Amino acid sequence: MIKLGSQLQEAAEQLEREKGIPRAVFMDSIKEAMMAAYKRYAHIHELEDTDLFQVQLLEKSGEIGVFKRKNVVESVENEEDEISVPDALGIDANVKEGETVYVDITPTDFGRIAAQSAKQVMTQRIREAEKHLVYNEFEDRKHTVVPGIIQRIEGRNVIVSIGRIEAIMPAREQIPGEYYRVGNKIRVFVSDLRDNGRVPQIIVSQAHPEMVREVFELEVPEIEDNLVEIKNIAREAGYRTKVAVTSSDPDVDPQGAGIGSRGSRIQAIVNELKNEKIDIIRWSADPAEFITNALAPAKIISVELLNTDPASQVAQVVVPDDQLSLAIGREGQNVRLAAKLTGWKLDIKSISQVQTMVASANPENAFVEGHGAAEPEFHEEVALDANSAEADDEEAFNVDELDLEEYPSP
């Protein structure tokens, strides 16, 4: 056998302490590496009898060796496969003729090629163990909000330590304008796993819409008790989020539950999300009512569903003249979030625009002073994609003047 000494124990303890790889996994990788090295040394390719050779490892003494199974016989005719009874008794005092024993055949010098083979096998086994560890960690924490510590900044990526493993937060998953400092404690949403062929990388996010859901679940007990349900979330991280809620209990106000006493709950959520504006919207099974609620705080005159095909739902919304910029929002943010929240493309029109359209289509019903305005009719489909809506008024409702990049719906 080959004596590795205390280095074996030290390596096992270091791997377990630094990377969380169990001692048993490391020891198994040592034995596999030894067997692979011996096969290469002895020019053995395939074994029909997998029990013919085995590697034995003595952890306490740090000794390791390759053993071959031999038949115990009275008279040895084939030294490769047989061993005499007296020699066998020196290995196992209870062995009898006709039985088998494993004989130490460890070469005194494997050579450079065998050692390199052992190193490659060990590296591969340890890498597989790391990969398995990351997968297990990911499955336990997938789609949850977890605490972490910023370890370092690599380019535009933030490396976050979550437990015993490191995760990456790409630039697109960060909150715009947020400053990330090494050593800071943060909460992140574990969103995905990227397999790059070596050790897989866990992707975390602070911009994902589900981050908002998890924070709401932490702050609002009614959600945990299934009295309040979050139906959908539309988010532009760092700026504004709309959350559609409903209640299974008629005595529970879903909006009030989210706001809390004197706004305590919503303030805690806003603080967690770095002062991001949060609109809690009452969900409705009636699309027109839901759209009306989603466009808050703008006042809505009417909502007409122009196209109810689920693949291309379009609704026309009429608002008072002084509410048009409020409904659209700065750079289209309010209508864009409402469209994502409801799943409808929204065409926002002021009452004056509608009257002009009606007058152009029906001159005989045009507005005549002293005789009132014609009732608006909605026959022509002129749908405006919410993603391209623009505000007419520069003084839109409480939204920072920034160039926003739309975050994809979950």
Image (tube, rainbow, N blue to C red):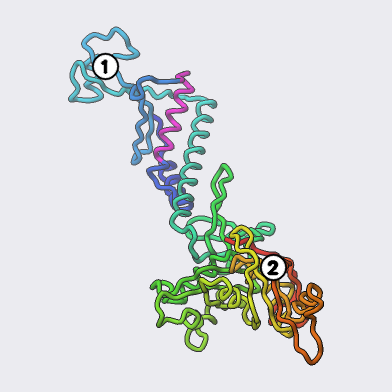
- Rendered location of residue 232, percent (x, y): 54, 68
Give whichever of 57, 3 is nearer the camera. 57
At 47% across and 74% down in the image, what residue appears?
246
Mark 2 crowdedness (10 Å alpha carbons): few <14, some 14-19, many ≥20: many
Between 45 and 91, the residue placed more toward the observer is: 45
Callout 1, which amino acid? Asn
Q: Could you say which is closer to the camera, residue 261 or residue 302?
A: 302
SS type, badge 1:
strand
The vertical placement of 297 against 191, above or below, is below
Mark 1 vs 2: CB contact within 8 A: no
Q: Which residue is mark 2?
A: 386
Magenta residue span: 27-45
Q: Is residue 104 visible?
A: no
Residue 40 highlighted magenta (yes or no): yes
Q: Quadrant of residue 168?
A: bottom right
Q: Residue at x 42, y 76 (%)?
A: 221
In the rendered image, residue 217, in percent from the top left (x then y), is placed at 46, 72
**Residue shown at the point (57%, 42%) measured from the top left:** 197
Q: Mark 1 vs mark 2: which is more N-terminal? A: 1
- Going by the numbered disc 2, the residue's amino acid type is Ala
Q: Say left or right for 39 vs 170.
A: left
Query: Which quadrant does the N terminus fall into?
Result: top left
Picture disc at residue 71? 1
Element type at marker 2?
A: helix
Q: Which mark is residue 355?
A: none
Residue 272 in view (yes/no): yes
Q: Is residue 343 above or below residue 373?
A: above
